[in-house]
Amino acid sequence: MRIELANPRGFCAGVDRAIEIVELALERFGAPVYVRHEIVHNRHVVERLRGLGAIFIEDPADAPEGAVLIFSAHGVSPAVREAADQQKLHTIDATCPLVTKVHVEARRFAAEDHQIILVGHAGHVEVEGTMGQAPERTLLVETVADVARLEVDDPGKLAALTQTTLSVDDTREVMDALKARFPEIQLPRKDDICYATQNRQNAVRGLSQQADLVLVVGAPESSNSNRLVELANKVGVPAYLVQSAEELKPEWLAGVSRVGLTAGASAPEELVQGVALRLRELAGDAAIVVSQPDVDEGVVFQVPSELR
């Protein structure tokens, strides 16, 4: 069996930054430090940080007055920030800068009296944070069919934004449908899909050309990880999402000679290596592990100045 590791895979710059912010805050302020929502969507990361003294909450009111509260990488709405202020919390923002860019655009469009069409998945924490920037002026669509059902105030005053972790192909289809139905709609100045999401999708697309099976290491709550599974399936290759080697099912490997292995942007590399090791155990001595060429994504986000 040939086990081919995708590149790039795993942690992106936004995830690296968010985790580092929690670690530095614990060093500087001591435990406990509160984090609004899971800092990133990976239970192994969350449990490790919990062991260091991080406490994960959904409502700022659940943190004691004056405590340190970190906003997760997915971003929050102004209402959450206001709730934290009311609780007199010391807030530190770990929102991915690429999500912050979308928030800034949402506020700009709202200030210009545009109605915003947000392409994203209902209930995802990033979507909730983005919609919260201008809730009275934002409509959510997930599919081309949703676009056909849209009822807008003024077709001449529309702007579109997207969740950063969507499928590039699916998002393009929805954007094309929006432009076809509302020719005057303002599309994002720059693609909102983050560089890491796009790069990992490109790598999986390449893997899927040769693989009999694709495995994606990631959490069920991770949007970008789920999109990788969908992409491989769309190409016609069976693909499964696993959180760790323990979830790997031997029957998946029946008749498989080539496995593509990757990870979502919030999955640690040790989990990928654990899955690769388990695959080698199941395949026996004939298994080999190879890797696509290394890719330097060239992106690093600084932590907030108070933690440097």
Image (cartoon, rainbow, N blue to C red):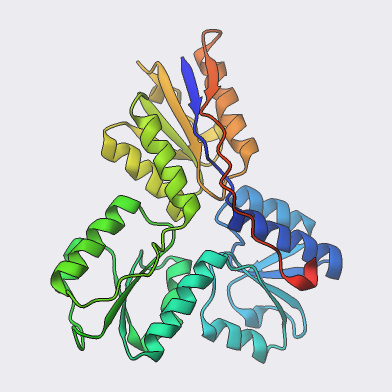
Q: Image point 35% across, 23% down: which residue?
A: 212
Q: Position of residue 78 (x, y in %)?
A: 53, 84
Residue at point 45% right, 72% down? 102
All told, the count of numbered labels is 0
Image coordinates for residue 103, horizontal then vertical, percent: 48, 76
Relative to 170, is 272 above or below? Answer: above
Q: Is residue 267 left or right of residue 35?
A: left
> What is the x, y in percent for residue 242?
48, 39
Quadrant of the rendered image containing residue 141: bottom left
Classify residue 63 by image quadrant. Answer: bottom right
* 287 relative to 307 in the view: left or right: left
Query: Which residue is pictured at 20% across the width and 83% down the height?
Result: 152
- In front of the other: 157 or 152: 157
Nearest the camera: 154 or 227? Answer: 154
Q: Nearer the viewer, residue 282 or 301?
A: 301
Relative to 83, is 294 above or below? above
Q: Is residue 75 above or below residue 203?
A: below
Q: Between 9 and 241, which is closer to the camera in this rendering?
A: 9
Give how far across and how far down residue 139 sits, in percent.
30, 78
Q: Is residue 221 visible?
A: no
Question: Which picture quadrant has residue 142?
Answer: bottom left
Q: 69 left or right of 220?
A: right
Residue 209 visible in rendering: yes
**Which quarter of the image is occupied by the C terminus?**
bottom right
Residue occupying image coordinates x 24% and y 76%: 185
